[in-house]
């Protein structure tokens, strides 16, 4: 596989983690760009990145760029995805991939028309421990899926000007953390046409601060999802089947899952290498797909999750200025 040149757009926390994942692999971004020149230059110096762009257009016009990694606020994603696609560049975009399904569909169409790969940087779709659990699902050890329970909560400073509560920056629990919980649900059960009942608490700015959802799909499988920006919750995901259940520790970046069977046998502990950055698996799967190998980027699952998030925000009346 030839070396692929990645460009990072955005220099925030997750961009630093991705740069560190590249470092772990003995590589680095080809170049970097962000709207704040000082931040861009500091990021480049920190990680030994030689090229710094002065504008996003310079990224898209550079013929040496193969993959654009987007780590900007949600409300900038669609614009950059479409521009990257039109310039023939593949895109790995941080979650949530867009604001809503309309934006995502436009982005997908642009990528398909230009023959490039689009994917959301969702660790749940790439961590090896999930594939190990699926071996037990596929050989029918666990039987039919019954119920999923998943929570994600953090205790953010109750400051309506920060990005978590700011509608100008597409804040709110659903797009910021709900995308993880719903991606966990979608990893195991269909969501198309599912019935959803919910409770939501809105922040003073109008974004969603806390919510609880009960989901039932056409197969009779169910899930409960609890999200909060103001209440800390353990990152535990439980998936219950006819013959037992699976507990994922730190499910959004899980290196360990335990299967408990109803027959009373010893729990089955599944692990992946804890020293490997979860983001490194995203890099590997993206490069394999770009090189023409198996595409394990799961854009279909991303689309299903976005459809649910869009539906729920519409029901709650949570809108962003761009909408």
Image (cartoon, rainbow, N blue to C red):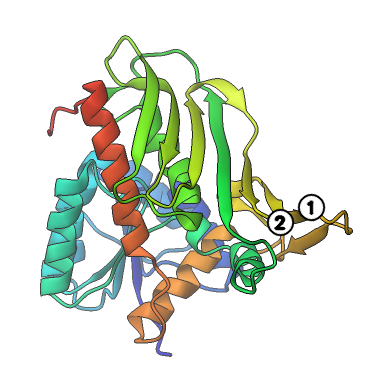
Q: Which residue is the extreme one toward the bottom?
A: 1
Q: Is residue 266 above or below residue 165?
A: below
What residue does disc 1 label?
Answer: 262
Q: Is residue 40 above or below residue 57?
A: above
Q: Is residue 289 above or below residue 180?
A: below
* For residue 242, side relative to residue 14 (left or right): right
Of 320 and 242, the residue lying toward us: 242
In percent of width and height, residue 205 lies at: 28, 14
Residue 140, located in which quarter of the rendered image?
A: bottom right
Mark 2–mark 1 contact, CB under 8 Å? Answer: yes
N-terminal of the pair, mark 2 or mark 1, is 2
> Quarter of the image containing the N terminus?
bottom left
| Element under disc 1 | loop
Q: How many marks?
A: 2
In percent of width and height, residue 224 lies at: 51, 34
Looking at the image, can residue 56 be seen?
no
Residue 255, located in which quarter of the rendered image?
A: bottom right
Looking at the image, can residue 302 be seen?
yes
What residue does disc 2 label?
Answer: 243
Q: In the image, which disc is placed on residue 287?
A: none
Instruction: Work out how far the residue at label 2 is from the one at label 1, CA to CA, in angstroms.
Output: 5 Å
Residue drawn at x 50%, y 56% is 188
Residue drawn at x 17%, y 74% is 88
Of 318 and 171, the residue lying toward us: 318
| Element under disc 2 | loop
Q: How packed is label 2: few (under 14 Cα within 10 Å), some, or many (20 or more)?
A: some
Q: How packed is label 1: few (under 14 Cα within 10 Å), some, or many (20 or more)?
A: few
In percent of width and height, residue 229 lies at: 47, 23
Of 119 and 36, the residue lying toward us: 119
Residue drawn at x 61%, y 28% is 233
Of 88 and 114, the residue lying toward us: 114
In percent of width and height, residue 3 lies at: 41, 84
């Amino acid at each position: 596989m030839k070396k692929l040149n990645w460009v990072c757009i955005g220099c925030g926390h997750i961009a630093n983690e991705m740069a560190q994942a590249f470092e772990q692999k003995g590589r680095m971004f080809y170049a970097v760009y962000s709207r704040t020149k000082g931040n861009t230059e500091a990021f480049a110096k920190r990680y030994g990145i030689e090229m710094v762009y002065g504008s996003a257009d310079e990224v898209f016009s550079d013929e040496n760029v193969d993959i654009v990694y987007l780590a900007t606020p949600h409300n900038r994603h669609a614009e950059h995805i479409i521009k990257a696609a039109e310039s023939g560049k593949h895109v790995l975009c941080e979650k949530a991939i867009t604001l809503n399904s309309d934006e995502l569909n436009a982005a997908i169409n642009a990528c398909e028309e230009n023959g490039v790969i689009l994917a959301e940087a969702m660790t749940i779709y790439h961590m090896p421990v999930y594939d190990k659990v699926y071996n037990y699902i596929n050989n029918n050890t666990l039987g039919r899926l019954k119920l999923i329970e998943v929570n994600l909560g953090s205790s953010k400073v109750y400051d309506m000007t920060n990005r978590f509560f700011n509608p100008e920056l597409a804040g709110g629990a659903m797009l910021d953390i709900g995308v993880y919980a719903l991606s966990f649900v979608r990893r195991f059960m269909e969501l198309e046409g599912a019935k959803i009942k919910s409770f939501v608490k809105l922040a003073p700015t109008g974004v969603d601060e806390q919510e609880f959802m009960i989901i039932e799909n056409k197969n009779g499988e169910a899930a409960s999802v609890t999200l909060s920006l103001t209440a800390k919750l353990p990152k535990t995901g439980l998936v219950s089947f006819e013959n037992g259940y699976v507990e994922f520790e730190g499910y959004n970046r899980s290196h360990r899952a335990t299967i408990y069977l109803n027959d009373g046998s010893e729990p089955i502990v599944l692990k992946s290498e804890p020293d490997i950055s979860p983001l490194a698996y995203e890099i590997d799967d993206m490069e394999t797909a770009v090189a023409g190998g198996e595409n394990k980027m799961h854009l279909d699952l991303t689309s299903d999750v976005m459809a649910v998030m869009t539906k729920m925000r519409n029901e709650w009346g949570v809108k962003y200025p761009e909408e």
